[in-house]
Amino acid sequence: MSLNEVFESIDQKKDESINILSELLKIPSIAAKGTGTKEAIDFLIRIFSEIGFNYFIAETPGNPVFCAELKNPEAKKTLIFYNHYDVQPEDPIELWESPPFEPTIKEGKIIARGVSDNKGEIICRLQAIKAYKEIYGKLPINIKFLIEGEEEIGSPNLPHFVNNNKDFVLKADGCIWEFGGKDSEGFQEIYLGVKGILYLHFKTNTIGRDIHSSYTQFVDNAAYELVWALSSFKDKNDKILIPGYYENILEPSEEEMKIIEEFNLKEELMKNTFGVDKFRLGLTGLDMKKKYFLEPTLNICGIWSGYQGPGSKTITPNEAFAKVDCRLVQGQDPDDLVAKIRNYLDSNDFKHIEIASWDGYPASKILPTNAFAKTVISTIEEVYGKKPVVWPMVGGSGPMYLFEYVPCVSIGSSHQNSRAHAPNENIFIVDWIKGMKAIATLIHQF
């Protein structure tokens, strides 16, 4: 059975696909702002129903999860797609070259908030399925979609959904995750896992109110207290000093180490991208790769206290705040780390520093020898005509752990300058159409 007719159908319906995507991109479904949820759900109901999917809407304490299924009674395998209909806020609006929720085509690219992350992939996958079904009447496998509405705020209610819908999520033979694309040299990238994350909000109050700085010798300064606490978390050599932070981390297998050793992290490209001449601690080569793939992090995302306005105001602040993110590797548990951080603060006279809130989830990954991973890798090589770059794990995070024993692989249609989360987010139309052909081929091969 040839897929040429499917590919021809995908090409012929390019304009139709762009129109469908544009309609979705016009919906400002921003979880952080609580906008566009109903409109996005209504849109998904309509376009999935038109193709013949059965669907249900799973309510959660937050935004609902859209679930759809297309069954073939004769099929022996099931593929599930994980996506999200929420997008990042459009700020800073003044840096957009065109309105973020008015899709614009320029120089072969579609520009809009959410086109790369992640609405473009939803329509890419759906249109591939539609073309396959129209040519052959039915698909050779069962298809499921799980499209949540809170990924951009940390998926706080996805565990609730999975716990109440385990059959839908876990009765699958493979999962295609949300993101991916090509690197700066045009090679497709495949991701076999994600780091976990722990995100903490700290705050402290030291005195009843801000006071004149001439009295600073007599009272505790909230800014100093928080800075001292944060500076005690790790040393200048990047070693995290919280007792037990590195406990339970799983040792890499020989197979995994071989993958890491052979991986090209493209150091010079990163230097150019980051605007640096060298990396911290003189990191390079295998040491740098081991640190990136195998070690956890602890990073201050933001810190503020005291007067922030124009001019001078001499005060000793009574409040201070900080946000910290920790990228976790396999074996680390967010709950366990929060308890260790709390104990560390308490034992170092920082009991007054409060962990105001936190959220997080563990890491998840598979090996390239996994049968599903091998199918995805061979499919991408076939469609794009060259071997893909296979990442053993990406430094970012996502709730992949919830899929437990279902192997997850991340692929997509973006590129190195797709600007996800930033102004002028974009994808190339030609890459997006090629992505549809890759999905059709994967369905065929799987």
Image (cartoon, helix red, strand yellow):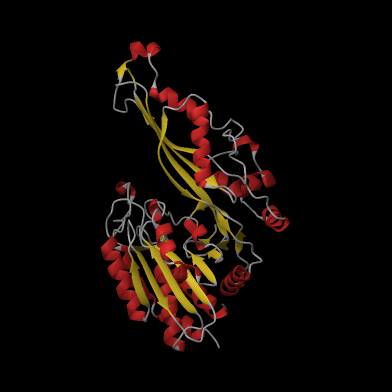
User: Does residue 365 lie above or below 313 as drawn?
Assistant: below
Q: Nearer the viewer, residue 157 or 97?
A: 157
Q: Position of residue 37 (x, y in %)?
A: 29, 61
Residue 225 horizontal side relative to residue 271, left or right: left
Query: Tag count in the figure?
Result: 0
One can see residue 87 in this view: yes
Q: Position of residue 392 (x, y in %)?
A: 61, 57
Q: Position of residue 207 (x, y in %)?
A: 34, 21
Residue 375 horizontal side relative to residue 15, left or right: right
Tell me the quadrant of the picture where the C terminus can be found.
Answer: bottom right
Q: Residue at x 48, y 24 (%)?
A: 349
User: Does residue 189 lie above or below 156 as drawn?
Assistant: below
Q: Residue at x 56, y 32 (%)?
A: 234
Q: Nearer the viewer, residue 340 or 233?
A: 340
Q: Position of residue 351 (x, y in %)?
A: 45, 27
One can see residue 27 in this view: no
Q: Residue at x 46, y 73 (%)?
A: 436
Q: Nearer the viewer, residue 288 or 235?
A: 235
